[in-house]
Amino acid sequence: MAAQLYVKIIRGPAAGKSFSPTAGSPLIFGRDPSCAVAIADGMLSRRHLELSWDGETAIVRDLDSSNGTRVNGASIHSAPLASGDTVDAGATSILIEIVELPDAPPVALATTGIADGLAVGAAGAAAVDVLVADGTPSSAPAPPAVEAPVVRLRIVAGPRKDATVRVERGERIVIGRARTCTVPIGDDALSGEHFELHWDGRTCRVRDRGSGNGTYVNEARVREALLRDGDTIEAGLSRFVVALPAPAAAEAGADAPTAAPTGPDAPPGDALILKVIGGRHTGAAFTAAPNTPCVVGRGEDATIRLDDLSLSGRHFELIWNGLIARCRDLGSANGTTVDGERIRTVLLRDRAEIAAGGNLFLVRLPAGAASAAADAPAAAGETPTTAAAAAEPEALEHELRCVVFKVLRGGRAGEMLVAPPVARVVVGRDTGCQVCLDDHEVSGKHFELVWSDPDWRVHDLGSANGTKLNGVRISDAVVHDRDEITLGRAQLLVRLPQIAPPPEVEPVFPLPVFGAFADTPAPPAPPVDEADALLTALRAGLAAAPGMRLYAVIDGAQAVELAVIARQLGHAVFTLFSGAAAGGLAHVGPCLVVLDDAAPFLPRWRAACGRNAGILLQSEAAPEPLSAHLRQIFVVTDESNQEFFFRYYDPRVLRVFLPTCTGDELRAFFGPVTRWIAEDAEAGAYVAFSVQRGALRTDRIGGPAPADNPAAPPPSTARPRPPDQPRSVPMRRTR
């Protein structure tokens, strides 16, 4: 029975070339143009190796090359070859296939177009390049080929979306960014040689080649894995779907490992997947098993440890019971944001995005959990996720929804910086910028990208060292996808979204906050003492006027959990910050809580006494005008017009400040407020301030009766800082 030798170059400058040598005519491979197979590979010797074929046996012989010849990874001087062997020389890999073809004359195999990452299409009449035995390329009709089982990779996301890669039996292909790969793809998030795929006619395997961002099979990171029909491979921004021939698909089904299914059939008890989609660890993925603590941070005791100084040692925690997932910030320095809103604890939905430090994470929940989350009421500003939408997998094209910068040069070279999906992105050194670069040659606010339908424009913001677009200094210009912007020592590759950003909405004031906690139960509290002196006094104040209302001002920086508990109890909570950033800063600033009936909330508030966490007040005003008044009296400016939040809502400050006010100052400070109530310096006692006949009245509530009540100090316009008064912290303007 006759046999035919087929040779295909699967890696290197000549990748994709296929041919069949004639029996008795050895082929010389090398760099010299006189070689039968001349390849422009700088790592090949001029005459590197010889391949001989006698009609039954193929033998490869090294010709004393500088870099040697390897067969299946082992260095050789001379060796016989079997079907499926791979010969490596320099940067070139050659696949050997010996096929028994009775009465079949030798034919030349056409290139398949695999080097372009695309299938040529129907064989037959199409003209293709053929490399004949003497190494001379020619154009000839593609010969009829015997249909053999092939694996197909369909690219469903990324720069080569909708292309199909054919992998023939015995073939080993390499996919990556380098042009020397079998399938080169212009995907900046791919490594030069990212992963390889080998199909031996029975099984198909994928192997990561030490890529920077990792290779994922069904969203689980792998080094090597056996593939099943329908599996997905993710690498960089590209996603592939594997289609195996029917017999191989049936055989692989029993042996292939699975990784956290996320389709409609995924059981609710599967692991939660956390994938890094922005930051220096882009591409990494982690799993969290049900009812297992999962802490993310840079500390030694973090479950998911990332070497990133922008993370706290224990930054945030994932709480996952197999059905419901929550994210809880662990008192991190830079905070945790979920879907653009800074949080303390929040219920997670499938595909929720968590920002922590310079990292952006994507949460993937099994189908049962995604469906359960879809049925939960949406928090303020959230779009409900339907079970149907959660069940349909969609391509992770993050670059289509927001601006992404790849740092080409500078201190953070190689990182992907993901901006929020907004119409104005400010880049600079200030931490308040959407994209922050720690570079002393970058101005605080260096430049901005602004969506001006139908284009994105880049504006220099009066930076000291200027902004360059594609090497030309500009003040204002249209920017296109893949343009390069230089600022300071940094050079950024710009990837623009291909859909218009959401329109900017005028910030709401006062802004309701902590809506995510509305449907979560409050922690247990001590029983309410109906005879409590403070509760009795508060109820008496409410009964004094039909329209009287009870409020609390809580300092989020001291006891944000009080504001959260108030929201869990059903009370409305508003931040006194204003502007677009107000929601993200609510946890560190003053919040107004509408109480009306203090009974459920009072035990919690009393438990926080001693921490100077806030004050109570009574007013007939509605929350909106009252919030405006409180912001007016709490915000002060210095000589340089820098805004400060002066903490009059600290009981220590209020107790010292009010007795120093004149009648006019009292009227201005009280405004619509009827009475201020603060904890006294003595534990268990409270003090209430009101204005009667233009003068300050002080009433003591609870605690032992004082022996002597010294007279208040004379009115003064001076504002001395008491020894125990905390310093005011300057706040950035938020609008």
Image (spheres, grey):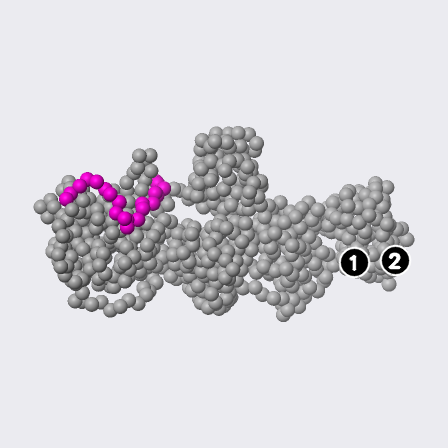
Q: Which residue is mark 2?
A: 55
Q: Position of residue 505 (x, y in %)?
A: 36, 43
* Relative side of 5 to 162, left or right: right
Q: Position of residue 653 (x, y in %)?
A: 25, 49
Which mark's residue is nearer the viewer, 2 or 1? Answer: 1
Q: Badge 1 local density, few (<14 within 10 Å), some, or many (20+)?
A: few
Q: Badge 2 local density, few (<14 within 10 Å), some, or many (20+)?
A: some
Q: Quadrant of residue 732?
A: top left
Residue 733 belongs to the span the image colors magenta: yes
Residue 103 belongs to the span the image colors magenta: no
Q: Are marks 2 and 1 in contact (CB under 8 Å)?
A: no
Q: Position of residue 82 (x, y in %)?
A: 81, 61
Q: Residue at x 40, y 42 (%)?
A: 503
Asked whether 680 or 271 is in front, the reply is: 680
* Relative side of 564 to 30, left or right: left
Q: Quadrant of residue 414?
A: top right
Please report whichever mark, 2 or 1, sits nearer to the chain's N-terminal start.
2
Q: Amino acid at mark 1?
A: Ala
Asked whether 530 or 98 is in front, the reply is: 530
Q: Quadrant of the image for the N terminus?
A: bottom right
Q: Secondary structure at mark 2?
A: loop
Q: Residue at x 34, y 45 (%)?
A: 729
Q: Which residue is mark 1?
A: 74
Q: Secondary structure at mark 1?
A: strand
Q: Main secondary structure of the magenta part?
A: loop
Bounds of the magenta span?
Answer: 714-735
Q: Amino acid at mark 2?
A: Gly
Q: Residue at x 47, y 43 (%)?
A: 435
Q: Quadrant of the image for the C terminus?
A: top left
Residue extending farthest to the left is 693
Asked whether 559 or 598 is in front, the reply is: 559
Q: CA distance from mark 2 to mark 1?
A: 25 Å
